[in-house]
Image (tube, grey):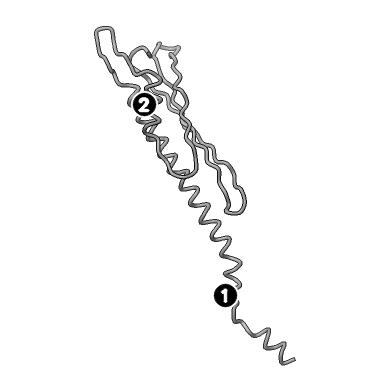
């Protein structure tokens, strides 16, 4: 009887056992926050690249009496690829800019799109694949070349 009371009253090591249960969950949560931060950084890189590509697409490279010659779709795509940034295991995919003409007033535009894909892990188990994309429509001054 005396032995049983001493076991139930002995609380040595309880903190270590509680930490053994809580620490793996805490580590997985911290790792998930790191991966989410990588995605947010990639989103900032996408927005920056789309802004640079949009600015470049609106430049009048050779002004003349007949209007402006705007950068080609390949040049705009290359500008976006050069300025996109992010960290982590993800990959960026820059789509070819598509040209179009507005039906209302005949204005020309480029549609720019960047996609980011990142596989995630929960350290021991595979996590969801993150797939995000952003698009921007850019109105250009002259005829698209």
Asked whether 55 or 88 is in front, the reply is: 88
Does 78 sit left or right of 65 as displayed?
right
Looking at this view, name the residue that lies furthest to the right.
Answer: 1
- Mark seen at residue 112: none
The quadrant of the image that shows the N terminus is: bottom right
Of 62 and 51, nearer the camera is 62
Using the image, tell me which numbered label, if any, was put on residue 15.
1
Farthest residue, direction bottom? 2
Horizontally, is 111 left or right of 9 in the view?
A: left
In the figure, 44 relative to 4: above or below? Answer: above
What residue is shown at x 68% (from left), y 84% (from top)? 8
Q: Does 18 appear above or below 60?
A: below
How many neighbours does mark 2 have within 10 angstroms: few (below 14), some (14-19), or many (20 or more)?
many
The residue labelled by disc 2 is 54
Indicate which disc, 2 or 1, sits on the residue closer to the N terminus. Answer: 1
Assess disc 1: are there few (<14), some (14-19) or many (≥20) residues with their C-alpha within 10 Å of its C-alpha. Answer: few
Question: In which quarter of the view is residue 73 placed?
Answer: top left
Question: x, y (%) of residue 75?
Answer: 37, 22
């Amino acid at each position: 009887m005396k032995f049983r009371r001493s076991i139930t009253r002995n609380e040595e090591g309880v903190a270590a056992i509680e930490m053994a249960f809580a620490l793996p969950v805490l580590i997985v949560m911290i790792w998930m926050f790191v991966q989410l931060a990588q995605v947010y950084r990639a989103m900032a890189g996408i927005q920056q690249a789309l802004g640079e590509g949009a600015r470049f697409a609106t430049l009048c490279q050779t002004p003349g009496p007949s209007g402006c010659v705007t950068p080609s779709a390949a040049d705009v795509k290359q500008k976006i690829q050069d300025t996109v940034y992010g960290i982590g295991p993800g990959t960026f995919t820059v789509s070819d800019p598509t040209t179009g003409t507005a039906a209302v007033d005949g204005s020309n535009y480029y549609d720019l799109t960047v996609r980011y894909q990142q596989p995630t892990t929960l350290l021991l188990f595979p996590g969801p694949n993150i797939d995000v994309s952003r698009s921007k429509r850019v109105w250009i001054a002259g005829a698209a070349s």
